[in-house]
Amino acid sequence: MTIADKVKMLDGKEIPVFGFGCYNSYGEEITNAVAAALDAGYRYIDSAARYRNEAEVGAALKNFAGKREEIFVLSKVWPTAYDAVEASVEKSRKELGVEYLDAMLLHWPGTDETRRLRAYETLLQLRDKGRIGTVGVSNFQEEQIETIKEQFGAYPAILELEVHPGYQQNALQDFCAERGIVRIAYSPIGRGRYQENEVLQALSRKYGKTTSQVILRWHLQRGTVPIPKSGHKERILENADVFDFCLTEEEMEILRGLECGGRMGLDPLTFNG
Ligand SMILES: NC(=O)c1ccc[n+]([C@@H]2O[C@H](COP(=O)([O-])OP(=O)(O)OC[C@H]3O[C@@H](n4cnc5c(N)ncnc54)[C@H](OP(=O)(O)O)[C@@H]3O)[C@@H](O)[C@H]2O)c1
């Protein structure tokens, strides 16, 4: 596996196996970080209207030396914009400075099912008009994903969800894997919280890799697409340097044992934006 590899989605399109997260970084820092990530070989940029930095991300995309079709640009619609999805998509597209978005997700399910389904339907319409490539969701639960299938005849191609060793969401991940839904792991290194973990430190010593690299490798071997974020070039390079070692089956099992229900993000069952 290499950073340039891609995986096929339910809609026949492809997404890179590794991405770069753009949350919580602004101004020149995020422009330089995205540029460094593209230089380092990252080919999927994970953006969102909510990050309020899409123009700065776009400044780096504009200077990308390769062809537009070599990179995968994903953005998300925030729940408070579910009555104005088309405008939100258009704003993201313009700020990112791209002709089309490779994927667009509903960022959170919210508690209002009617609104959620209407927003999803609008994304499907925009896809059918060729304005976006792939339609997906983030932070959705099994039942909400099944409802989409019942209403629109197909599963979303992507579920972006919080995953790191202490919060693995194994049941939801298995549910997606069985249905061919691509899983994107957000906060994949738990925002740096595993540096002192002894199990990870032991693997870190064995492979001559950092604990973050061990975790990112674990995601890849589980078939989950990790999207680590860093504002620092050396960490951007470090996080991408995970394609030259392999954890054993036994080690994968040991890491499974780190699950402890340690969600860091918001509660998808109640959050409305
Ligand atoms: N769909 C959603 O609801 C949702 C929610 C949250 C996040 N996301 C997406 O997922 C992306 C990643 O998640 P995240 O930003 O929450 O967390 P993360 O990628 O797990 O961690 C980022 C944090 O870890 C630090 N870091 C990065 N590389 C490191 C390394 N090698 N060693 C030690 N520390 C390191 C970064 O600091 P420095 O920047 O200082 O290096 C930053 O503070 C986001 O950027 C966003 O695109 C999506």
Image (cartoon, rainbow, N blue to C red):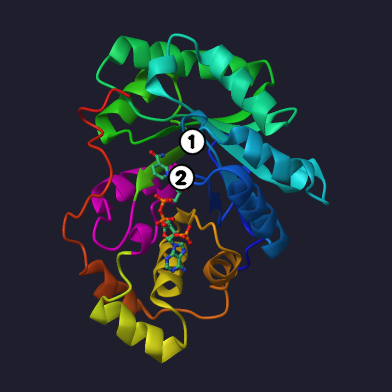
Determine which residue is flagged by label 2: 24
Measure the alpha-carbon separation of dots 2 and 1: 7 Å
The answer to whether residue 119 is above or below residue 253 is above
* Discs 2, 1 touching: Cβ within 8 Å: yes
In the image, which residues are magenta? Answer: 163-192
> Residue at left 17%, top 54%?
261
Q: Amino acid at mark 1?
A: Tyr
Question: Quick check: 196 left or right of 148?
Answer: left
Q: Is mark 2 within 8 Å of ligand 1?
A: yes
Q: Amino acid at mark 2?
A: Asn
Callout 2: few (<14), some (14-19), or many (20+) C-alpha neighbours within 10 Å?
A: few
Where residue 148 sits in the image (x, y, percent)?
A: 38, 22
The answer to whether residue 153 is above or below residue 56 is above
Asked whether residue 115 appears in the rendered view, the answer is: yes
Q: Which mark is residue 51?
A: 1
Q: Secondary structure at mark 1?
A: helix
> Residue at left 54%, top 18%?
88
Question: Quick check: 55 left or right of 245?
Answer: right
Q: Quadrant of the C terminus?
A: top left
Q: What residue occupies the far bottom of the structure in this picture? A: 206
